[in-house]
Image (cartoon, helix red, strand yellow):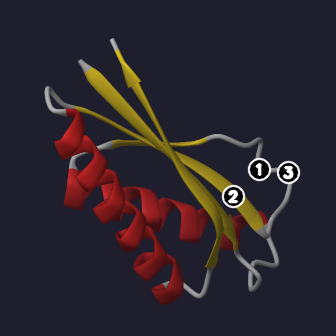
Amino acid sequence: MPVAKLTVEISISHALSLKDRRQVVRSLKDKLRHNFNVSVAELDDASLWNRAVLGIVALSSSASYLAGQMQEIDKSVHRLAESLSAEVIDSYVEQVEF
C-alpha cells in the first residue's frame, strides 16, 4: 500500500510571537485536514516564531491517485499560506510502497 508524505516549510514574516505563529499553523492544519482528509503534523520544535515545517501524510491503494492528491494539496497549501500572509519556502513529496 503506497504512502505519500508532503513536507512543507513555511515562512511567517508577520509573526512576532509564538501565538501569531500558532494561529497560522493551526489554521493551515485544520483546513487541510477538513478539505483533504489527511494527517497533518508540525515537524519542527517551534523555536523560531517566523518559520514552520509541516508534514502531510496520506495513504491509498493507488500510487497514481496519491501523486495527484499530493499535487492538489501542495497547490492548496500555497493558496492557504498566501491567504494567511505566509509564504511557502520549500515543499517536496516522498512516496513509499509497503
Q: Specify whether 14 is left or right of 95.
A: right
Callout 1 touching callout 2 (CB < 8 Å):
yes
The secondary element bearing badge 1 is classed as loop
Residue 13 in picture, x, y percent from top left: 77, 82
Q: N-terminal of the two: label 1 or label 2?
A: 1
Which residue carries the number 1 mark?
Answer: 46
Q: Secondary structure at mark 3?
A: loop
Separation of residues labelled 1 and 2 (CA atoms): 7 Å
Q: Position of residue 36 (x, y in %)?
A: 22, 54
Quadrant into which the C terminus falls: top left
Q: Which residue is mark 2?
A: 52
Whole-angstrom CA distance, mark 1 to mark 3, is 4 Å
Mark 3 highlights which residue?
47
Residue shown at the point (44%, 69%) measured from the top left? 77
Is the residue marked by circle 2 packed among few (<14), some (14-19), or many (20+) residues within 10 Å?
many
Farthest right residue in view:
47
Give the residue drawn at x 15%, y 32%. 62
Q: Amino acid at mark 2?
A: Ala
Q: How many marks?
A: 3
Whether pointer 1 and pointer 3 mark residues with C-beta atoms closer than 8 Å, the reply is yes
Comes first in the chain, label 3 or label 2: 3
Q: Is residue 20 left or right of residue 45?
A: left
Q: In the picture provided, is 6 more to the left or to the right than 7?
A: left
- Mark 3–mark 2 Cα distance, whole angstroms, equals 9 Å
Instruction: Give the structural element (helix, strand or loop) at label 2.
Output: strand
